[in-house]
Amino acid sequence: MISRLKLLVKQLKKLGLSNDALKIKRIIKICSMPGIDYPTEEIDVEGIDSVLEYLDENPGKFIFLDNPKGSKKRFGQKLRKKMPFHYGEFTEVNNPADDMGWDVIIVPSAKTTTDPEDEEEDVKHIPQGHSLIAVGYVPVNDSDEEWREKTKSPSRPEGKPAPKGNDKIVLAPDGVVTDDDKKKIEKFFKPMWNFKDVIWL
């Protein structure tokens, strides 16, 4: 089933249907949950304050890691940057801002492997029942004017509107975030015009 969905994603991308491809990729992520071979129930939670409250009341939700630590991601920039942290999403908690799972950053100091000898941490997901707690978030730049100016292109002369509400939640084991964690996350996002300063809780 998963392999067929992956083929479908490739075909949709070839046809220029990238939004449809993203939706199928979301189904793949949900199906990747251990013991799950069909999409699970999702809940829409709008706004950072609401999702932080929801996660406080419903801790330990399954996390799919799109970009494990050490992988590279653009975050809307021209060049890809190496990730000093795991980056993924709560597959069951949907953010209406982009109709995808709420994005999460796991502090660099977090050890997510079950093998104490494993330093590379080749992980694709974090099972349900973990102790990761929200310690902050990275707010997206919500200036429509700046977004439209910076994202102009021949194919999109008006540019893109700001993806308001597509903030990134920072998680730490048992809610413990170190000064070094904060410095690494702040340093990573500081040069990016499309984000505001990290807010720590």
Image: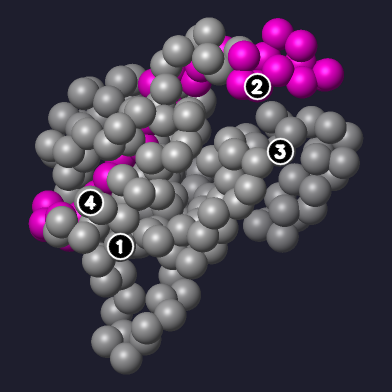
Q: Residue at x 48, y 67 (%)?
A: 70
Please identify, in this view, whether the residue under mark 3 or under mark 2 is nearer the observer. 2
Determine the CA span between mark 4 and mark 1: 9 Å
Q: Is residue 54 left or right of residue 114?
A: left
Tell me: residue 130, above or below residue 189. below
Please identify, in this view, whether the residue under mark 4 or under mark 1 is nearer the observer. 4
Precedes in sequence: disc 4 or disc 3: 3
In this rendered view, identify the residue nearer to me: 14 or 77.
Answer: 77
Precedes in sequence: disc 2 or disc 4: 2
Q: Which residues are magenta?
A: 149-177
> Mark 1: which secondary structure?
loop
Q: Residue at x 62, y 35 (%)?
A: 23
| Residue 182, label in figure | 4
| Residue 21, label in figure | 3
Please state which amino acid type lies under the numbered disc 2. Answer: Thr
Q: Residue at x 29, y 79 (%)?
A: 114
